[in-house]
Amino acid sequence: MPRVVLSSPDRKARLRLEPDPDGQWWTLYHAPEPDRLAWYASFGARTPVELIAAFTDALTDPALPADASSDPFAPLQQIGWAPAFADNGRVSPDGTAYVQRLGSAEEPGTWFVTAALGQDRPVWQARFGTHTPARLVAAFTAALADPQPVPRFDSGRSLATLDPNVVTRTATDVLAVYVAGALEERVHSLAARHTAPSSSPTPSRQPQTKNSRSR
């Protein structure tokens, strides 16, 4: 089973992949900062990779201010998720996913995002600690609310359910070369966000005046 540990350049954040049949597989820990206590985010084994990527992309985006504030419930409200859990959460129209924040308005707590097929069939869960920046949780819920279809290699076992009332499948032939290059293209596009253009202009040569001398 794969085990991976990635550390940020400043050593403040660490993302760990450690498969655990009874727990979360992906866990990100962030060290405390002057204006924020330590926080964490974790994702279960079946959490869609697009949602995890939305979270980590927002975390590493240099164009997004660290103190930017967002409402994680806003993307869900915009597409009709209904209030749940005494107004401390939202549930999807089909009832398969819900987002909840424990605590109160005065003392907010941990975020829980759960996908389930019925009361006794949880599929995956994501958790965000009390001090996780709201903009990062909002990036996750925005990806969760995105109605665009996502590509999957379906061997019949890669989907949590084949129930046509929950999942709509469309088969598309894709050239192997496109699949092989998808990861490399994504890495290059993310790396390009951190490539800042040179701020120092190239000095230009001034033409010599008629009375100037040179040796």
Image (tube, rainbow, N blue to C red):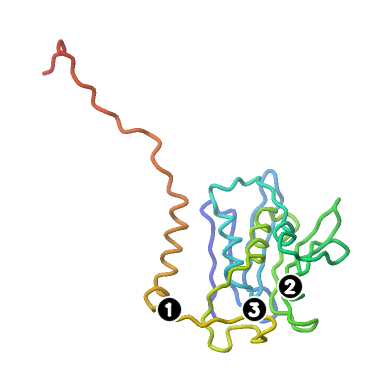
Residue 26 placement (x, y as % from top left): 62, 70
Residue at the far left in the pictured view: 215
What residue is shown with label 2? 97
Residue type, label 2: Ala
Residue name at image x 39 percent, y 78 percent: 175
The residue where tag 1 is placed is 174
Q: Which mark is residue 20?
A: 3
Q: Residues within 10 Å of mark 3 (few under 14, many from 20)?
A: few
Q: Amino acid at mark 3?
A: Asp
Residue in the foreground of this view, choosing between 192 and 6: 192
16 sits left or right of 76 in the view: left
Mark 1 crowdedness (10 Å alpha carbons): few <14, some 14-19, many ≥20: few
At mark 3, the secondary structure is: loop
Q: Residues within 10 Å of mark 2 (few under 14, many from 20)?
A: many
User: Considering only order in the chain, which callout, 2 or 3, is on the residue closer to the N terminus?
Assistant: 3
In depth, the one of 103 and 205 nearer the eye is 205
Real-space Cα separation, disc 2 to disc 1, in angstroms: 30 Å
